[in-house]
Image (spheres, rainbow, N blue to C red):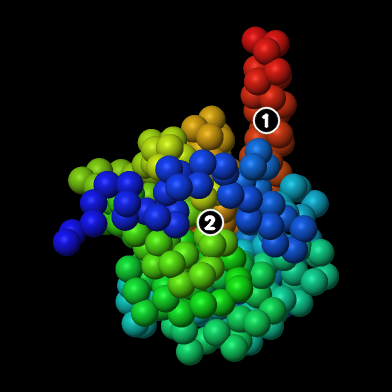
Amino acid sequence: MEIVGDEQYRCAGRKFHPEDTVVEVGGVRFGGGSFTLIAGPCAVENEAQICTIAERVKAHGAVMLRGGAFKPRTSPYAFQGMGAAGLELLLKAGNRAGLPIVSEITDAAQLPLFEKVDVLQVGARNMQNFALLKCLGRTDKPILLKRGFSATLEELLLSAEYIMSEGNGRVILCERGIRTFEPCTRGTLDILAVPVLKKLTHLPVIVDPSHAAGAADLVEPMCLAAMAAGADGLLVEVHDEPQNALCDGQQSVTSEAFRRISRKIKLMQTALKQTEGGDA
Ligand code: PEP
Ligand code: MN
């Protein structure tokens, strides 16, 4: 018998778990009223790059450091990431700056290398890699699950269900833009995904404006829109020499631009809190 409706989201569905889930890791909280800023380069490139960005984004309000070591690139000839050495550098940068780290895992065979990584990211290209999702469901690591470019919200939730039904309830969902007919931007940020997911699931929902926009100057307005839409946080690509970045430089904001974003986010947060308190 085909399972339809609320029944298919027996782990992720709000119907069966009305309270918001808060995912806590390394002193950082996702969900439950926090707004969590994750920042860092698309890819770890060398020690100076990742350590400098880590210090700067921490100073500007990030509470978690991102950096890809295994990069699933469209072309096999593009930079594929530093692999295990990249994870070591990310860890070093995170430790020095006092930031927990998140990095993308592309194959369950990499799991031993991710032992000290706080949050494991499943990228858009792997959202329906069910074998990987099931393996991650048997770990005790929080999973940042990104929406596939052509995945519906129902498919995203069912992918979360693959992880959760194996026993791992610590899933954070991420809207990162979908592929539409619009060629002016890399993707189309589905901002409606935020309130819709919030209705359907108790899991935290964050937004990655960088991959949706594909251009650094479009990142700030999408960050603010994500917060206004009710997201639980942001994942922002930051690089201080974007013209020399090995991956996604065109959409990476500088740490100075990240500082401005972070400041505006704080101001908005204060304003929204006041309205919740009945002042508006
Ligand atoms: C990334 O976060 O760098 C990334 C590859 O994202 P996505 O899987 O959303 O394309
Ligand atoms: Mn990227």
Q: In this view, does 280 lie above or below 107?
A: above
On the image, the x and y values in percent for residue 270 come to 72, 26
Label 2: which secondary element = strand
Q: Confirm or reject: label 2 Cβ below 8 Å from ligand 1.
A: no
Which mark lies nearer to you, 1 or 2?
A: 2
Residue 55 vs 208, above or below: the answer is: below
Tag 2 residue: 172
Amino acid at the residue labelled 1: Gln
Residue 57 x %, y %: 72, 55
Q: What residue is disc 1 on?
A: 269
In the image, 264 versus 129, the foreground residue is 129
Task: Residue 34: name its quadrant.
Answer: top right
Question: For the point 43% across and 37% down, which residue is it?
Answer: 199
Please state which amino acid type lies under the numbered disc 2: Ile
Q: Pinpoint residue 209: horizontal percent, then vertical percent.
A: 48, 47
Q: Which of pointers 1 and 2 lies earlier in the amino acid sequence? A: 2
